[in-house]
Amino acid sequence: MPLRVIAATLGLLGLLALAACGGGTPSSARPSESATVAQQVDDLAFSRPSTWQWTALDTPVQAGDGDVVGYLVTPGIDAAALCGADDTDACALAADDIGAGSLAVELTSGSSLSADVWQDQPPGDAEAMTAAGMPALYRESTDGDDQLLSWTIARPETAGGWYRLDARLRGPGQEALRSELESLVASLSFEPAPVTPADDRVSLAQIAASALDELRHEPRGRRQFECFDEQAGTRPGVVDELPGMKRLAAPLAVSCSLRAEATQWNQYRVRLRYAWPSLAGRAAGEYVVTQWVAPDGTLGPSQAGGDKP
């Protein structure tokens, strides 16, 4: 038999033998148990294990302090049965919702300037951290043998906005599940990405002046904010109405000061402060309006509070 035919025959036999032994597919081409896929939920993006399933609710369900958006679960859990508008109390992840060696994560969104993740100081039961480039709070506890992990993350779109991931994990394999979950949290990002506001003196002065001008154009704004000056510093004035309060019984002599700052939430915070001294049996006091402003200068929500004249 010619050598060329012998070589071809041996080569064919070798390939058949390799295929019979299962060696035809390189190990690197096999599906990996740790493979991840990209997931997008509104403006929040992350990478999740390919075996975990994301299920969005048809309509967000109001439950507690926010709206439940959906669930991320390991195989064997019926995410669609975890929450419904007809029984919002059931939306909170409970021990009966998961089985052995499984995990469920509830994603909730909300918006409030009183939300704990939008405060200057974190609450005592939470650890301050950063997630997706934004301030976040982490909490950890247990319920029997289950681990309960929670991340609350400030949203950059508007002041007061937030997401919360509440997770319940059960062994066996609890540590592996936790490691995958922590990798998911590390992959979180916002799209579009947060824009860091400029914090130089000129930019802050422009933001303060622009915010004041817009506030004065609101109904009754001219009367309420007339005493403020676009420039930094304190200015004396007289007001007969404070934002968010009924008209005063008599004009009130005040000192008005305006200050803008760039914050860790990638938003500007403009504080407009009214202060008055004690006079004729009236106690000294102050009243502060906090106006949030987006990096592009768009006015966001505001809050006001302080002493009653």
Image: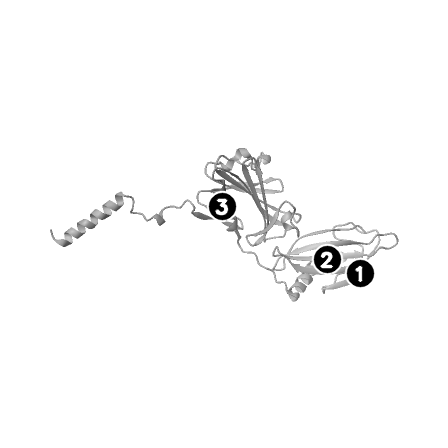
Residue, disc 1: 237
Residue 121's label in the rendered image is none
- Kindly give the residue lying farthest to the top in the view shown: 96
Residue 291 percent coordinates (x, y): 68, 55
Q: Earlier in the sequence, mark 1 or mark 2?
A: 1
Question: Residue 273 occupies which quadrant of the picture?
Answer: bottom right
Q: Residue flagged by tag 1: what amino acid is it? A: Gly
Disc 1 packing (10 Å; few <14; some 14–19; many ≥20): some
**Label 1: element kind:** strand
| Closer mark to the observer between disc 1 and disc 3 | 3
Residue 179's label in the rendered image is 3
**Label 3: element kind:** helix
| Closer mark to the observer between disc 2 and disc 3 | 3
Residue 178 percent coordinates (x, y): 50, 43
Which residue shows up at 78% across the image and 63% down it?
A: 235
Which residue shows up at 73% across the image and 57% down it?
A: 272
Q: Residue flagged by tag 3: what amino acid is it? A: Ser
